[in-house]
Image (cartoon, helix red, strand yellow):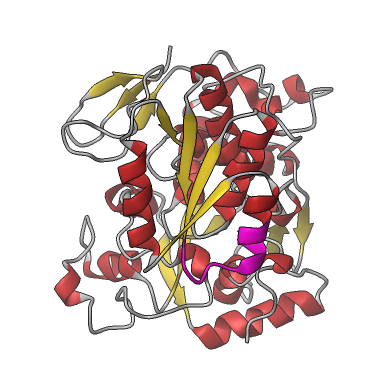
């Protein structure tokens, strides 16, 4: 059976418990489990057309909460850049990949309630899948969250808690609630089941590209859930001999909120002290159109920085002007994507020297056009 393990101090916990973080250091869990069997391209023929087709490498099987998530199209945009259309998920964002794993796990544990915190998309995804699983759900979001996202959360029947302050204040409020008995914290940051859902993004690339991966995979990074899922998948595929090399992971942040990029550039293994960031564009005080990656102190920072370095990748940042221009440019090409989801196109859309895939993570209807 899978087991939680703390990457910092080795503390372990059973996944049947509602222990949402390491009790020793309060850090996020990793997941220790063994794949159920081998996976090959030939074995996939005729399987269910959702992310559950990769069941051997997932920590859960035989789901009842699925909405058919996954298997989104991969579309060439230029001669070297392709886009994966994850805004075509059931709740219109890539967060469905991880949310279905959390809701399915919660369903099996039968908590009294589910709690989540989000800048919007993770909250809407958790609300939808909890509705599917008939689980009571409360979603905490920061003030200023897109009204379209809060409307979607309410539509799925979740209780909405709007928290004064920023994303960190919202996370703190949710974690306080998560400590109550009988509560399952459906955290896309702390619970590693979410990462094992997002890794299916790369398994789909591998399948659609005939058993190979592009030279680089670009991902927008706030809490890093898609990047860490991609790192998991590339490591698994390489270890099983299903790819002969691991692609470079290109992490993209908004220049206004780019603590990981700042740490990467100095060679640091973790986030820089706050006093080194407070006066610069990488600091937590600045606002950005890319609300989904406006995370000043991501809990998995060490793992994110290590994953990018181990892949031979790098961090890139984009300005607010580049975000606005990228959203309009993609719309002119037929893709209406929210402001967070255009960050990677802004960063690497002009690349011509190597193949790269960018995720179009959320639908433009979630935020509208940038002002």
Residue at point 62%, 83% (across, down) = 324
Residue at point 32%, 27% (across, down) = 19
Query: Between 155 and 61, which is closer to the camera in this rendering?
Result: 155
State the extent of the magenta-drawn residues as a range: 142-151
State the quadrant of the N terminus. Answer: top left
Judge left or right: residue 217 versus residue 260.
Answer: right
Residue at point 76%, 22% (across, down) = 42
Q: Position of residue 236 (x, y in %)?
A: 49, 31
Vertical placement of 66 versus 38: above or below?
below
Q: Quadrant of residue 367?
A: bottom right
For the question of whether residue 213 can be seen, the reply is: no
Query: Between 217 and 344, which is closer to the camera in this rendering?
Result: 344
Judge left or right: residue 91 versus residue 5.
Answer: right
Vertical placement of 55 versus 172: above or below?
above
Q: Position of residue 211 (x, y in %)?
A: 68, 36
Query: Between 145 and 197, which is closer to the camera in this rendering?
Result: 145
For the question of whether residue 270 can be seen, the reply is: yes
Q: Position of residue 165 (x, y in %)?
A: 36, 69
State the quadrant of the C terminus. Answer: bottom right
Q: Is residue 366 magenta?
A: no
Query: Between 117 and 208, which is closer to the camera in this rendering?
Result: 117
Residue at point 19%, 70% (across, down) = 274
């Amino acid at each position: 059976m899978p087991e939680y393990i703390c990457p910092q101090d080795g503390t372990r916990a059973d996944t049947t418990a509602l222990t949402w973080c390491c009790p020793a250091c309060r850090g996020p869990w990793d997941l220790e489990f063994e794949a159920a069997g081998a996976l090959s391209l030939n074995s996939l023929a005729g399987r269910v057309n959702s992310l559950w087709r990769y069941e051997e490498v997932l920590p859960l099987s035989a789901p009842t909460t699925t909405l058919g998530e996954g298997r989104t199209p991969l579309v060439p945009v230029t001669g070297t850049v392709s886009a994966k259309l994850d805004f075509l998920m059931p709740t219109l964002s890539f967060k469905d990949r991880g949310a279905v794993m959390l809701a399915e796990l919660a369903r099996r544990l039968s908590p009294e309630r589910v709690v989540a915190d989000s800048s919007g998309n993770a909250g809407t995804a958790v609300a939808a899948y909890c509705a599917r699983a008939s689980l009571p759900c409360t979603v905490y979001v920061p003030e200023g969250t897109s009204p379209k996202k809060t409307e979607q959360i309410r539509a799925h029947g979740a209780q909405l808690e709007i928290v004064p302050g920023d994303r960190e204040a919202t996370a703190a409020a949710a974690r306080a609630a998560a400590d109550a008995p009988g509560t399952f914290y459906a955290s896309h940051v702390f619970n590693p089941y979410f990462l094992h859902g997002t890794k299916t993004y790369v398994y789909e690339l591998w399948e659609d590209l005939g058993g190979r991966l592009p030279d680089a995979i670009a991902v927008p990074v706030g809490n890093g859930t898609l990047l860490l899922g991609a790192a998991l998948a590339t490591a698994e595929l390489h270890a099983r001999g299903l790819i002969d090399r691991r692609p470079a992971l290109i992490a993209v942040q908004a220049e206004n909120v780019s603590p990981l990029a700042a740490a990467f550039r100095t060679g640091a293994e973790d986030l820089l002290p706050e006093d080194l960031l407070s006066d610069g564009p990488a600091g937590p005080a600045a606002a950005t159109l890319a609300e989904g990656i406006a995370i000043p102190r991501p809990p998995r920072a060490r793992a994110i920085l290590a994953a990018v370095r181990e892949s031979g990748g790098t961090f890139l940042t984009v300005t607010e002007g580049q975000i606005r221009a990228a959203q309009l440019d993609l719309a002119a090409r037929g893709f209406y994507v929210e402001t967070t989801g255009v960050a990677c196109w802004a960063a690497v859309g002009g690349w011509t020297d190597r193949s790269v895939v960018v995720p179009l993570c959320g639908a433009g209807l979630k935020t509208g056009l940038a002002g």
